[in-house]
Image (spheres, rainbow, N blue to C red):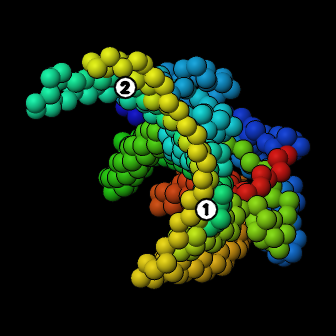
Amino acid sequence: MGNIYHRALTILAMGLTTVSLQPLVAAGPLPQPRSTSRQQVPHHGQDKTPPGVAPTAAPATGPKPPNQPLASPPPATDIAPSVPPGAAEPGEPANPRDLTAEPNSLTLPSKPEQVTVSTTQSISLKAAIDLALGNSEELRLALLQLEKARAGLRAEQATLLPTVDLSGSLQNTNQNSQGSVTGAQSSTTVSGTVRTDYDLGLSGERGARLQVAEQQVRLAELQVEQTRQELRLNTTNDYYAVQQALSDIRINQAFLEEAQRNLRDTQLREQVGMGTRFDVLRADVQVANARQTLTQATSQREISQRQLSRRLNVPATVSLTTQGVEIAGNWPLSLEESIVAAYQNRVELQQQLVQRTLNDAQGQRQLAAGRPSLGLYGLYQVQSLLGSSTGSQSSTQDGFSLGARLNWRLFDGGAASARAEQSDRDLAISEVNFEKTRNDIRLQVEEAYYTLQANQANISTAKVSVRQAKEALELANLRFNAGVGTQLDVLSATRELTQAQGNLARATLDYNRALARMERAVSQPARSE
């Protein structure tokens, strides 16, 4: 009986203290952009209003007009990921030698331990992008295609020079003549020929083929650059996906701990007669739901980490995790300046222009089939008699000749003109594709810009919501412990705080994602601070 009385006193004493959900950031300050000071996240009873934010209302700063550059977003709360077991510390750089791709691309693991993840390494975003550029199969394929195109160009350039051919033969001849008193006659001769040919390029086919090869090399170069840019964007998105998953785990873990604490308190209240079985059941259901949500978040983290490892093509035994979340930078250009910069920088527009030039050269090559071609040649021949059964002495004969050769197909049924017309249609298609790509690029820039504005404002709003939700949870706990509130108030306040913390994490990561899309849309890096 004394034990129950002691528990009752403990519960009543809880009304004198503030019990609140562990804040989203329990590990310290958020790494901020370099030009802004780091801000420690306030704990219970120490909340301070962020700079420029009203105490009870969201900041009045909305999205700036499109003709103004975006200002730097306010410092966001750090969402430093918890490091899984076996992982390197967040500040510890990964060893590049351990993360390089397998040098033998034909290697196939044959043992389970060769594909078992045994190491988890923390890696920064910059290091992740560098690894992706060094290990990516897509980029290697693009580089191989470039080398192939350059080899084709060298082959076409070789047609500008004359060709030289050498041929030789050794022949033994036997002849039988009926009625001849000498019988069979045999002789052995050796001969050789050196021939050189040179096309004067009168038809224009050689020049057109050379131009086609040059444009194919240019297309391959642009494809390499496009692959690099897409790889940077995809790697950045995969990196932020891991950060998002780690943030969800931490938020749901904090919610689970608070739900378990609430369940313990509710059970104690029931034991001393201050609570009901209904309250215990509701608290138990809340714990079960929180545990399921945490399990799903853990699964998503594993998937996100493997996706990042796959993108970077690291060894099969290595898994990657991320470092703390920080504002990636700010966009220095206005919307109109961004659109113009995108028109100047995007390789997709240059690809369409190069494709148009290539199609024009293809048409010229097809028309050349109906034009006359003129070539020069030189020929040197030598023949020597090595021996004969008739007793003839060895002899050598040689000769040299020069000439010109004219070829002209007078009628081909209209095949050449039809193929040239096909190339003309391809040229028109390239022009339409250029217009379509230009309009798509503008839309991509506008979408990224407006998303960037929205998430920039959401960061400030989410910070105010987190502070207010923490205050509301503290009041709900105080009211419930004093007997003037309900458990439903505590549960609702807990959910609202969890939602507010999740909104802050998503706003920060969504801002970084939008900034990455903006960099890709304009093909220009943002300004770091």
Q: Nearer the viewer, residue 447 or 487?
A: 447
At label 1, the amino acid type is Leu
Question: Residue 222: in sight, yes or no?
Answer: no
Q: Position of residue 4 (x, y in %)?
A: 40, 34
Residue on which the image places disc 1? 374
Residue on which the image places disc 2? 189
- Per the image, label 1 sits on a secondary structure element best described as strand
Q: Nearer the viewer, residue 213 or 93?
A: 213
Q: Quadrant of the N terminus?
A: top left
Work out whether 361 lies above or below 469. Answer: below
Q: Quadrant of residue 203?
A: bottom right
At label 2, the amino acid type is Thr
The label number, if any, that marks residue 64 in the structure image: none
* Residue drawn where x is 58% and y is 73% of the image: 371
Work out whether 463 lies above or below 295. Answer: below
* Residue drawn where x is 75% and y is 43% of the image: 42
Q: Position of residue 144 (x, y in %)?
A: 54, 41
Work out whether 457 lies above or below 422. Answer: above
Q: Quadrant of residue 450?
A: bottom right
Q: Earlier in the sequence, mark 1 or mark 2?
A: 2
**Residue 119 vs residue 289: left or right?**
right
Separation of residues labelled 1 and 2 (CA atoms): 35 Å
Question: Residue 300: in sight, yes or no?
Answer: yes
* Residue drawn where x is 52% and y is 57% of the image: 495
- Per the image, label 2 sits on a secondary structure element best described as strand
